[in-house]
Image: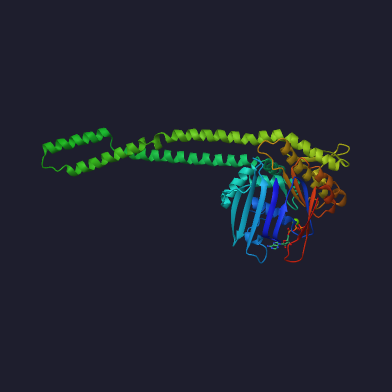
Amino acid sequence: MLKSLELKNFKVFADQLFEFDKGSLAIVGPNGSGKTTILEAIEFALFKRITRKDKTIRKVDDLIKHRQRKSKVKLTFIAPVNQREYSVIRNIYHGRTTAELRLEPDHAPIESTPRKVNEEIEKILGMDRHAFSALTYVRQGEIDSLSRSTPSKRRANLYNMMGLGIYNTTTGKTKKLFKALRKELQAIKEARKNLQSIKSLLPSDDEIQAARSTIKRINQDVPDFDVSSIETILEKVRMSVEDIDSELGKPNITDRPDEISHDMKISKQLQRILQTIPDIAEVQLRPHIRQEARTIFKEIFGDKYSDLVIDDDYDVSLFDLKGNKVSLMAASGGEDVCVNFALRVGMNTALQKHSIASPPPGLLILDEPGAGLDSHRRRWLPDAVQGLDSINQVIVVTHMEELKQSVDRVITLIPQGKGRQPLLEISE
Ligand SMILES: Nc1ncnc2c1ncn2[C@@H]1O[C@H](COP(=O)(O)OP(=O)(O)OP(=O)(O)O)[C@@H](O)[C@H]1O
Ligand SMILES: [Mg+2]
């Protein structure tokens, strides 16, 4: 849950504090007044990045308010995994960022490099940024992304939202480890083969002994014959044989292959287990998602449709009041938005109630969920937002006046003209 956001010279905001509370909040204001900027600042504070519908902002300096040199963002939030309060502070200056994570109130920084802060934040959120943003943040113009994608993409997207993407990442890591081990084993086998082939070219111990006795005899029989150079060569050969034998006897050649084979077996097993966890978790969660999404959808569309059914491939179908299946593709843009809204919220509510992978963030951010809806379809939005009470904190960015009545608090941004930060009007 978010507690507060402090912005200094961040885009249109020169110096602004936002305080967040439990319940629902609407952020309203005309185009360009800075609504999306607030959401971007939250994402930036958490993950040091901002993703838009079709691009990621690459130059951090673009976030600094025009004609200013540096910018600061401070976000205070309650971490889902331990319910403790943290602050993350990021400064932007000359194309670089600094970061600091503090345990509140007023504790010393627990992490103070951007990389460490990012890692720690993923830990205390209980999920990586993809999962967090998929689950909590419906970007402007993205509400229909679920229904518009192919079933396999939809499934992957939903897996991410369930926080199960982490298992795929870990499976990927075990696969990498397995490959590295196999490579090492091959290298050792190769080395052993080389050593053995060299050894086969060298004389055996017995042959060296025999040569020694022969030299001794020659030396006795023909004392004038100088055998010292032959002895030196023989000694060198003997040392080479000894070297090769000792190489072949080293633990790296003798024991390591067994260790590697053992590790390979374990990493294969781990891979199998990791691959099944998301499926099991997903199968357990699926009925709840279906039920929640259906309930929400029926509340919104009960006058026109009888049901919303999600099959095992996450293909979504609508049924009309007579029970006939209606293709989602045939649904209007507005209906599409509703299906997506129902799916997203269904997912969030299901996770909230039946969490498996990690505690859900308890936060849902919707940027312009009403965009693309006709006036009739827009009417359900206030009810839908009001119905989100199972989620701790809901932030809706909107132009819609109608939404003001259905939320607990409203922040209105009133533009003050070019280069000046908007005025804030807060109403309960
Ligand atoms: N570095 C910057 N310094 C000052 N202002 C900026 C900077 N970068 C962008 N802006 C301005 O910030 C404003 C806020 O944009 P934002 O996307 O937050 O608006 P919005 O309220 O979400 O609008 P919409 O309703 O169209 O979605 C824009 O007018 C933009 O020109
Ligand atoms: Mg916007």
Residue at the location (72% across, 53% down)? 18
Pinpoint residue 263: horizontal percent, then vertical percent.
50, 35
Question: What's the residue at 76%, 60% (across, down)?
Answer: 423
Comparing 114 with 147, the one in front is 114
User: Considering only vertical position in the picture, is 93 above or below 212?
Assistant: below
Question: Relative to the observer, which residue lies in front, 314 or 74?
Answer: 74
Q: Nearer the viewer, residue 18 or 143?
A: 18
Left or right, 109 with reference to 33 = left
* Residue 66, placed above or below residue 389: below
Task: Tell me the residue at 44%/35% (across/down).
Answer: 257
Residue 265 picture location, percent across and down: 52, 33
Compared across the picture, whether 300 is left or right of 112 comes to right
Name the spot of residue 176 as percent of width and height, x first: 54, 42
Q: Position of residue 117 (x, y in %)?
A: 59, 49
**Displayed-image quarter of ligand 2:** bottom right
Q: Quadrant of residue 126?
A: top right
In the rendered view, does 205 fall on the left or right side of 221?
Answer: right
